[in-house]
Image: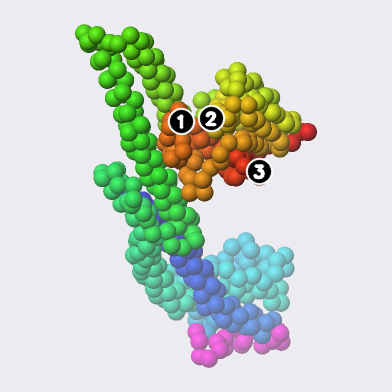
Amino acid sequence: MSFRARLALVAAAAVALAIVAASFAVYFIVKDQLRAPIDDSLRHSAVDIQHTPPDDILRGLFHLTAQLGGAPGYPQVVKPNGQVIAIGSRTTPLPVDDRDIDVARGQSSTFLRDAHVSGIHVRMITFPVGGVAVQVVRPLNEVDHSLSRIETWLILIALAGIAIAAALGLLVARAALAPVRRLTATAETVTHTGDLSQRIDAGGHDELARLAASFNAMLEALEESTRAQRQLVADASHELRTPLTSLRTNIEVLASDRTLPPGERERLLNDVVEQLGEMTTLIAELIDLARGEQHVAEPEEVRLDLLAADAVERARRNQPKVTFITDLHESTVHGVPSTIERAVANLLDNAAKWSRPGENVEVGVDNGAVTVRDHGPGIDDEDLPYVFDRFYRARAARGLPGSGLGLAIVRQVARAHGGSVVAEHAEGGGTRVVLRLNGASNNS
């Protein structure tokens, strides 16, 4: 059974229960309303007889009447010993039980009950009069006939209501599940075609609209991820083509039988080693980028100042011609130490690359932010918006070593930790890069 059919069935069942409950309530209310005049008439007759002088009681029983020409009461007298006295020529006895005898003996008061006399459904009242009990009955034929017709009509109305509820339930379920059908159709289209540009109309503010909006956001994220992966593959292929071609050429020259000039073989071997190193670095950076925001380790509390101090020490060993000046304040962030350390190291390497021998690189840590400032030529205004893009290299940097991925990795690390990174012109020349990591607490 489909979800739409189940939803319609549940709606129809709920309406059916409501209709059945309402029908029962209407039936019993109408029943009480139809029988109330008869009960009132029987009580009125009992009061009249009880207030009749003793000598006129029998005459009053002979001449029982009903309001508006209704059926007259049918009386019978019950003695304390249970003996029944018929009134006039009426010979059909009325049923007598212990309660009627208790009324005749004065041990019980007036009461009403249903009974059957000669197959006729009647309403009976028993009340005390002068040491005996008097029973008066009135037939319920008309009331029962009316109730029977009402019962028939209520059943028909209930069945019609259930049928209408089922039909409306199907219509409502169809309308309510229209966004789900659109979502399903879109998901199937994406599955069959791989087209992540599909979107669902997410109008409205209800739960289904929010589901459609979430689905659209998921498709958008997948589309962006797929686009980024394709771009990464295309960029990586382009970047690897040049060093691979040069490496292949050098190896072919070294492997040939040609006689090389003195020192040429050593130069070619050094070029091969250097190119292999560049490719190793490039591939490692590509792997880091391909991981996206997936951490290789669980996040933990990280002393950003201590991590930066270690990175600076390594940078000093690798870049002995550049002076690193630090201003590190105690600061703790929540993140993955290895990826944060890689980002800081990339910032230091980038600053050192643009610094002339003997120039300073200033490194600061405070309140969850790492600031690296160099005194190099700075970044041109036209290049500043793109320095964190993958494989982007400014014209001034195309003669320098590097893959164009270092700052892209820094931005990726910042985003993975809920932070940001910006590059700006530094006062007095050079470049100032600020890496901020969210969730930091300043302990200085």
Residue furthest left as drawn = 257
Which one is nearer the viewer's eye here, 35 or 302? 302
Residue ID at (42%, 74%): 150
Which percent across, then down, holds residue 308? 65, 27
Residue situated in front as seen by the camera: 130 or 127: 127
Q: Does dot 1 land on a helix, a strand or a loop?
A: loop
- Which residue is painted at 62% across and 87% down in the image? 60
Amino acid type for the residue under numbered disc 3: Gly
Mark identifier at residue 428: 3
- Element at label 3: loop
Residue marked by disc 2: 353
Q: Residue at x 43, y 32 (%)?
A: 399
Whole-percent x and y of residue 156? Answer: 36, 70
N-terminal-most mark, 2 or 1:
2
Q: Earlier in the sequence, mark 3 or mark 2?
A: 2
Amino acid on which the number 1 mark rests in the picture: Leu
In this picture, which residue range is highlighted in magenta?
A: 51-71
